[in-house]
Image (cartoon, helix red, strand yellow):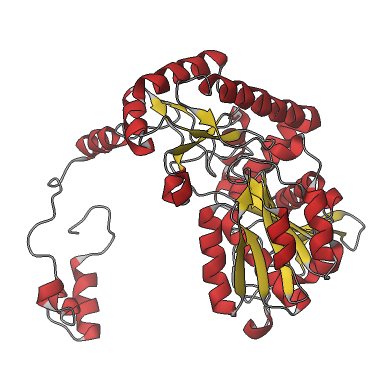
Amino acid sequence: MKHRYLPMTGQDRAEMMETVGIQSIDELFADIPQSVRYQGTLPMSGALDEYALLRHMKGLANKNADFDTHASFLGAGLYDHHVPVVINHVISRSEFYTAYTPYQPEISQGELQAIFEFQSYICELTGMKVANASMYDGATALSEAAVLAAGATKRKKLIVSRTVHPEARQVLRTSANAWGLQIVEIDYADGVTDLAKLAEAIDSDTAAVLVQSPNFFGGIEDLRQIEPLIHAVKGLLVVSANPIALGVLESPGRLGADIVVGDAQPLGIAASLGGPTCGFFAVAEPLMRRMPGRIVGQTVDRNGKRGFVLTLQAREQHIRREKATSNICSNQALLALCASVYLSVMGKEGMREVGELNIRKSHYAAGRLAEITGAERVFTAPFFNEFVLKLPEGSSVSAVNSKLLKEGYLGGYDLGRDYPELSGHMLVAVTEKRSKTEIDEFASALEGCV
C-alpha cells in the first residue's frame, strides 16, 4: 500500500488501469495540454509521521485569528455569540452526529423528533404557521423564497432592498437568472429601505418584495409600512430575519410577512471560520405545499402512539423533477439541532435577555466609538447589534483592520467592498459576549489606528 491513509493496494491500481485501458496514471491526464499543467513540485513538506503531521497542522491552525484569540467586532452575517457547552455535548452523540437522512421513520424517530422541534421553534420565533426542516444557509433560503413567490403569484418581477446582505443578493441574482426572473434593487435612505422609491417600483407585475430586518447595516426595517405596499397588488412580503433579534422584536409573521427566512448561525452554531451554517424557512399556511426541502410531521401509529414522519416532500428526489418545488435536496439537521438545543436552553426569558444585551452593548459601543476624533455614525435609524461607523477622513478600513489585528481585535467589515459610496465606512458588530472593558479598549485601539 503506497499511502497509509488511502486503502488502495497495488493490485487495485493495476486492475483499475487494466479496466480503463491505460498503462500508467499519467495517461489519465493526456487530454490536458502540457502548457496548462503545473510544472514542478508543489511547495509542501515531505512525508511526515503522524506525530510530526499533527504538530505541523496545529502550527498552521494557530496562524488563524479566531474568536478564542481575538475580541471580535466583525459581524456581517457571522457572529461571535455565546455557544452553551451543552450544545456540543448533545450533537456529539453518535445517534445525531452520524445521522443523515431519516428515510426510515421506524428507526429514525429521534432524528425526526429533533427536526420537528426545530420547525416548531422557528414557527414560534417567526410568527408563521409552517417551517421546513432547514436549508443550507440564509442566502439560499432567501433565493428559494423568491422562487416560491414567483411560482405562487405567477409573476416575474422581484424587488429587493440594497440593505439585504450583498452575498444573499448575489445568490438571489444567480437563482433568478436560471428561472428567468427580473430583479429590481431599491436603494436605502438613512440605513433602511427607501420607502418612497419602493412604493414607486411596486406594480401589478411584482411577485414579491424582499427585505432584511435587522438589515445588513443593522437597521430595523419598518415592516408595518412595507407590508401594505406589496399586499395592495397581491404580491408577497419576504423577510430575512436575525433569530436573536426576534427575541425582542415583533415577529415578522405578526407584521404581515408571507415568508420568513434567515440564518440560524446566531443560535448556538459556531462561526467555524466561515461555516457551515443553517438556514430556516417559514411560510403562511396557504404557501405550505410550495415550500422547498423537507417537512417533518407529527402523527400516531396504529396503536395511537405518537410518531414522526417526513411529509409533504415536494423535492426532486421524491417527485417528478419538473414538478419539484426546489432542487435543494438536503437539510442541515445537525446544525438545526444546535439551534434547537440553544433555544431550549435559553427559553423565552433567555432569548429576551440575550437580545437586550445585544442592543444595550451595541448602543454603548456606538456612542463610545463616535467619540473618536473625526469618526461618526452616519445613520440614525434604530439598529439591533450592528451599526455603521464612518472613519476619519482619509482612513482605509483595510489598513485600520490590519493594525487592529495586531492589537488582538477583529475589526468591523469594510463596507466599501460592496457599497462604493460607503468607502471608509466600517460595519461594527457587538454581541452579548463583548464586555464594557473590551468595548472601551477596542475604542482606544481604533483611535490609535486611524
Which residue is situated farthest in the top direction here?
Answer: 437
Q: From where the camera sits, is residue 133 visible?
A: no
Q: From where the camera sits, is residue 395 visible?
A: yes
Q: Is residue 90 left or right of residue 253?
A: left
Which residue is situated farthest in the right direction here?
Answer: 304
Total marks in image: 0
Which residue is situated farthest in the left direction here?
Answer: 40
Nearest the eye: 349 or 187: 187
Tell me where residue 177 appears, x and y as whole percent. Answer: 54, 75
Quadrant for the N terminus, please: bottom left
Where is 191 relative to 39, above or below? Answer: above
- Identify the residue at image location x=70%, y=38%: 245
Tell me where residue 405 appears, x and y as whole percent. Answer: 35, 28
Quadrant for the C terminus, please: top left
Tell me where residue 108 appears, x and y as whole percent. Answer: 69, 56
Q: Is residue 232 left or right of residue 86?
A: right
Where is 280 relative to 292, above or below? Answer: above
Q: Is residue 359 left or right of residue 237?
A: left
- Identify the residue at image location x=24%, y=33%: 55
Q: Quadrant of residue 234?
A: bottom right
- Identify the residue at image location x=50%, y=15%: 440
Tell me where residue 154 appears, x and y as whole percent. Answer: 74, 80
Nearest the eye: 387 or 55: 387
- Identify the residue at image location x=61%, y=35%: 87
Nearest the eye: 13 or 310: 310
